[in-house]
Amino acid sequence: MKKKSLFGIVLAGMLLLGGCGGRSYTKNSEGIAAEAYTYAGSAPAAAGYGFSSGAVAADMADYAVYDEEADAAEPAMGMPDVGESAATSSRKLIRNVNMEVETKEYDDLIAFLQTNIAAVGGYIENSYSYNGSAYNGGGSRRNTSFVFRIPADNLDQFLSDVGGRANVISRNENTNDVTLAYVDMESHKNALRTEEQSLINMLARAETVEDLITIENRLADVRYQIESMESQLRTYDNLVDYATLSINVSEVEELTPVTEQSAWEKMGSGFMASFHNIGRGLQNFGIGVVMNLPYILIWGVVLLAAFLIGKKVIKSVIKKIKERFKKTKENVSENPA
């Protein structure tokens, strides 16, 4: 339906004197909500809009004319010719990648990531670091989490560079195609722009306060919708132009094997890992002893003092018992029954 007819019906519905309007929501294959606006009802007569000004009423009557030829040539609003648009412009793809990597050269890898992200035109959106200062019994390790925003054209090369410098444990990528939602929103915005210009023309010919208020209210609503859609389109553009990479970097002593091992390789690596774990266990035990040495010394002194005091008390008790036994024995000897 031609955009002029659309506005006439919408405005008539706003004044409760004309056709009715409805809004339906559909989802494309990627789950992106796309609004499709459909309006039912015939275009009312010019007088039905409630304008007191003859000039403005005439404009509205002309605005609500249903042009069958134009309607046949123009795609319905909310259902743009996506195939043609997609053919003439690149698709709108939002890429998100999650990676977990490990390395023995932790400092070098962190420095590489921070330097290379700037070199490819990206930036760090968020980061979190743990410096491994806390002792956890199993050997603490440093790790850092980054959220990078990278130009979509440079994402694959950046991922390749990271894979060449670190051992990739896991990688998850999803691509969200928002082409349908984007084209639909652009089409709706353009329709609102046309409506905005028509309202401005009508505003210049309004002759009564009532007509001015009605047109200005609708104009304010149209401009609000345009600003909202432009904001959403800018958000889409940012997400499409800059891919999001979430990466967690862990420091390790031994890298996790990336290929399947044979039985002999598994036995050999397991045997060596056992020795490694024993050595690390002894090392951790020694570290734990040194770390807790002040407590050990304090408790050692307390226990030694308790032992010495207890020993002295016991000796004193034993001595008293022996003296009593000796006196009892002497009394029995001096006074036999």
Image: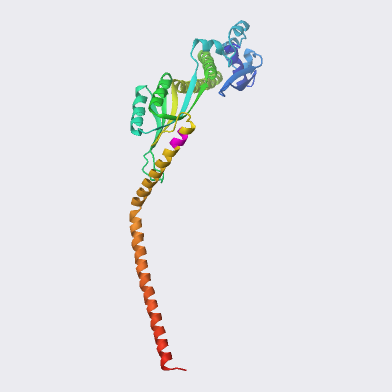
Which quadrant does the N terminus fall into? top right
| Residue lying at the far right of the rendered structure | 41
On screen, residue 24 versus residue 337, left or right, reads right
Residue 268 is inside the magenta segment: yes
When the figure is inspected, residue 232 is found, relative to residue 198, above or below; the finding is below
Query: Residue 40, located in which quarter of the rendered image?
Result: top right
Q: Residue furthest top?
A: 69
Q: Nearer the viewer, residue 209 or 124?
A: 124
Query: Nearest the camera: 337 or 119?
Result: 337
Residue at left 49%, top 12%? 89
Q: Is residue 157 visible?
A: yes
Q: Residue at x 38, y 47 (%)?
A: 282
In magenta segment, residue 212: no
Give left or right: position of 156 versus 22: left
Q: Identify which residue is drawn at 64% across, 16% down.
A: 48
On the question of residue 206 being in view, the answer is no
- Seen from the viewer's position, the closer of residues 325 and 190 is 325
Q: Residue furthest front?
A: 264
Percent coordinates x, y for residue 98 in the rendering: 46, 29
Dominant SS of magenta comes to helix
User: Bounds of the magenta span?
Assistant: 265-269
User: How many numbered marks appear?
Assistant: 0
> Residue 305's spot in the image, x, y percent?
34, 66
